[in-house]
Image (spheres, rainbow, N blue to C red):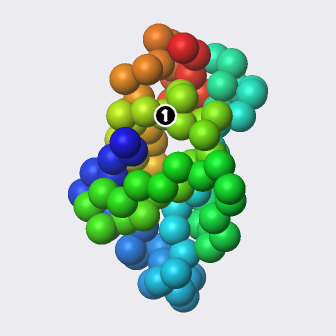
Amino acid sequence: MLFVADSAKDKIGELMTAEQIANEYFIRVSVTSGGCSGLSYEMDFDNEEKEDDQIFEDNGVKVVTDLKSFLYLCNTTLEFSGGLNGKGFFFNNPNASRTCGCGESFAV
């Protein structure tokens, strides 16, 4: 399962309204090679499901990831932190053994 914190849900709603993104869009999350810790998160709006997609809905937000990425993301929570010291969107990933200072990459 992938989870969505209230803070992320609120920000996603704001972005969808500001960008006039239709309700049939969802959040696509994936893991790619790279970053200072070895693996990086990617996140974007999408409206096309693929054959190996894992589909979750939490807190009213539909989140989709490919099967390979899900192996790294299982039980991860998408969060958002704003303000002067905020990180923006970030992932609270219990599978990560190490993360970089910026929170955009991790290792397992």
- Quarter of the picture holding the C terminus: top right
- Is any part of residue 47 visible from this angle? yes
Which image quadrant for residue 105? top right
Picture coordinates of residue 61 (x, y %)?
37, 65
Secondary structure of the residue carrying tag 1 is helix
Which image quadrant for residue 17? bottom left
| Crowdedness near tag 1: few (<14), some (14–19) or many (≥20) residues, C-alpha within 10 Å | many
Q: Which residue: 68% across, 56% down?
A: 51
Q: Which residue: 53% across, 86% down?
A: 22
- Is any part of residue 82 visible from this angle? no
Q: Which residue: 45% across, 42% down?
A: 90
Position of 42 with respect to 72 (left or right) is: right
Position of 28 with respect to 63 (left or right) is: right
Picture coordinates of residue 30 (x, y %)?
62, 43
Front-lying residue, 67 or 40: 67
Picture coordinates of residue 91 (x, y %)?
43, 38
Which image quadrant for residue 87? top left
Task: Tally the marks.
Answer: 1
- Looking at the image, the residue that sits furthest to the right is 34
Position of 7 relative to 19 (above/below): above
Position of 33 relative to 17 (above/below): above
Picture coordinates of residue 6 (x, y %)?
24, 57
Position of 86 relative to 69 (above/below): below
Front-lying residue, 80 or 65: 65
Position of 87 with respect to 36 (left or right) is: left
The three-letter code of the residue at mark 1 reads Leu
Q: Which residue is mark 1?
A: 73
- Quarter of the picture holding the N terminus: top left
- Looking at the image, the residue that sits furthest to the front is 51
